[in-house]
């Protein structure tokens, strides 16, 4: 089966085409365009306008890149939530128009679950992981338990990527700031005390952000501040992930989301996994960040296991929770 997926929850609009080959995922094309605000944070309406400007071209390009024809597409899927309303609506509208004009079925999918499933679909040995999903808006630890994907821990305020980007904005760094902070952190020598807030299995970052900004005002070295931000936030993420593994008794850890590109985070989670005798996986970068291929793949899994949607079922859901998904495709 060949499925075209449209991702549009936040900054990025993506179109991916996948084909299932014996129930594993072959990515035929996966194109992404990212909206970068000139100043300040993301403006949902401007991001949606950006997505509307690019979506048609991305669809044509992805068809060309995948060496398929429109008539080869068996299913159209899209990110139904969670995310920013105007962005979600733009992606959903494009998906409905395409599905109706091709006379093909449509499937709305949960963005967070898609991050996990693309790991299972593209990494052969990854079967039943605990996912540490770290992106701009989202920070969650997710695993399959008793028939559903459950959130074992999450941020109580902002996502880790957002925390890094906000600190970057405070320092007038270019957006997104995560990669720049990573480079600076490599030159950090001194650890500066920062709030380490874990409440139960949940994490908070905004207190740390304020404290980090105070260190700037106190003229501490920027390299040391970046180093301390990474060490503190990543340690908290690793701790919650470890506790989720212990609780679920799983033996695989998967990273997902844009912050998974960070080498220090990878090293910390990998060390923790190895110490517990668990396997550690990170999907390839183009399927790790927000992308259409993961949406296409989850759409395929749902359709293949018998899920169906009519156009009336395709309204977007800004607060689409991970544990609301009816997981029909797993035992
Ligand atoms: P979502 O809608 O899932 O929240 P998003 O729009 O934030 O996604 P992603 O591509 O998953 O998109 O993640 C982008 C985030 O990843 C940004 O906050 C960026 O700063 C961060 N990031 C990218 N590379 C790195 C890195 N090397 N180190 C730390 N953070 C990084
Ligand atoms: Fe994401």
Image (spheres, helix red, strand yellow):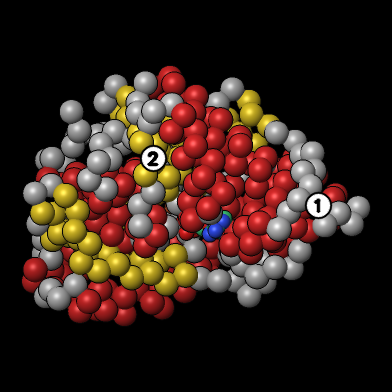
- Which residue position holds label 1? 213
Does residue 317 appear anywhere in the picture? no
Judge: label 2 CB < 8 Å from ligand 1: no
Q: Quadrant of the C terminus?
A: top left
Residue nearer the viewer, 78 or 30: 30
Where residue 57 appears, x then y in whole percent? 31, 80
Characterize the local packing of mark 2: few (<14), some (14-19) or many (20 or more) Cα atoms within 10 angstroms.
many
| Labels 1 and 2: the sequence-earlier one | 1
Residue that numbered label 2 is attached to: 280
Q: Secondary structure at mark 2?
A: strand
Left or right: residue 305 compared with residue 296? left
136 horizontally vs 248: left or right: right
Say left or right for 182 vs 33: right
User: Is 139 located above or below residue 26 in the figure?
Assistant: above
Q: Position of residue 84 (x, y in %)?
A: 49, 55
Label 1 Cα crowd, 10 Å radius (few <14 / some 14-19 / many 20+)? some
Single out the residue that lies furthest toward the right.
218
Q: Are marks 1 and 2 in contact (CB under 8 Å)?
A: no
Does any atom of ligand 1 lie closer than 8 Å to the CB of label 1? no
Q: CA distance from mark 1 to mark 2?
A: 33 Å
Say what secondary structure mark 1 lies in. Answer: helix
Looking at the figure, which quarter contains the N terminus?
bottom left
Q: Residue at x 35, y 52 (%)?
A: 283
Q: Residue at x 25, y 41 (%)?
A: 125
């Amino acid at each position: 089966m060949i499925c075209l997926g449209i991702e549009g929850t936040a900054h990025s609009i993506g179109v991916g085409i996948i084909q299932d080959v014996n129930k594993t995922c072959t990515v035929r094309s996966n194109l992404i365009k990212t909206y970068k605000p000139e100043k300040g944070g993301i403006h949902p309406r401007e991001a949606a306008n950006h997505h509307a400007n690019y979506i048609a071209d991305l669809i044509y390009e992805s068809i060309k890149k995948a060496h398929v024809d429109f008539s080869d597409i068996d299913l159209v899927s899209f990110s139904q939530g969670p995310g920013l309303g105007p962005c979600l609506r733009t992606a959903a509208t494009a998906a409905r128009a395409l599905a109706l004009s091709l006379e093909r079925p449509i499937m709305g999918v949960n963005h967070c679950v898609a991050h996990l499933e693309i790991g299972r679909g593209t990494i052969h040995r990854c079967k039943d992981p605990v996912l540490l999903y770290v992106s701009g808006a989202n920070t969650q630890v997710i695993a399959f338990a008793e028939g559903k994907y459950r959130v074992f821990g999450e941020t109580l305020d902002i996502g880790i990527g957002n925390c890094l980007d906000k600190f970057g904005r405070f320092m007038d760094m270019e957006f997104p700031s995560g990669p720049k902070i990573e480079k600076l952190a490599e030159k950090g020598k001194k650890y500066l005390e920062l709030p380490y807030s874990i409440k139960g299995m949940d994490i908070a970052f905004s207190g740390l952000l304020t404290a980090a900004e105070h260190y700037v005002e106190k003229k501490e070295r920027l390299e040391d501040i970046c180093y301390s931000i990474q060490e503190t936030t990543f340690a908290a993420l690793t701790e919650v992930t470890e506790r989720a593994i212990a609780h679920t008794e799983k033996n695989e850890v998967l990273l997902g989301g844009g912050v998974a590109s960070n080498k220090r985070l990878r090293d910390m989670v990998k060390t923790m996994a190895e110490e517990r005798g668990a396997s550690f996986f990170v999907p390839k970068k183009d399927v790790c960040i927000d992308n259409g291929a993961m949406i296409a793949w989850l759409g395929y899994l749902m359709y293949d296991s018998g899920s169906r949607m009519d156009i009336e079922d395709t309204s977007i859901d800004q607060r689409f929770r991970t544990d609301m998904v009816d997981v029909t495709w797993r035992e």
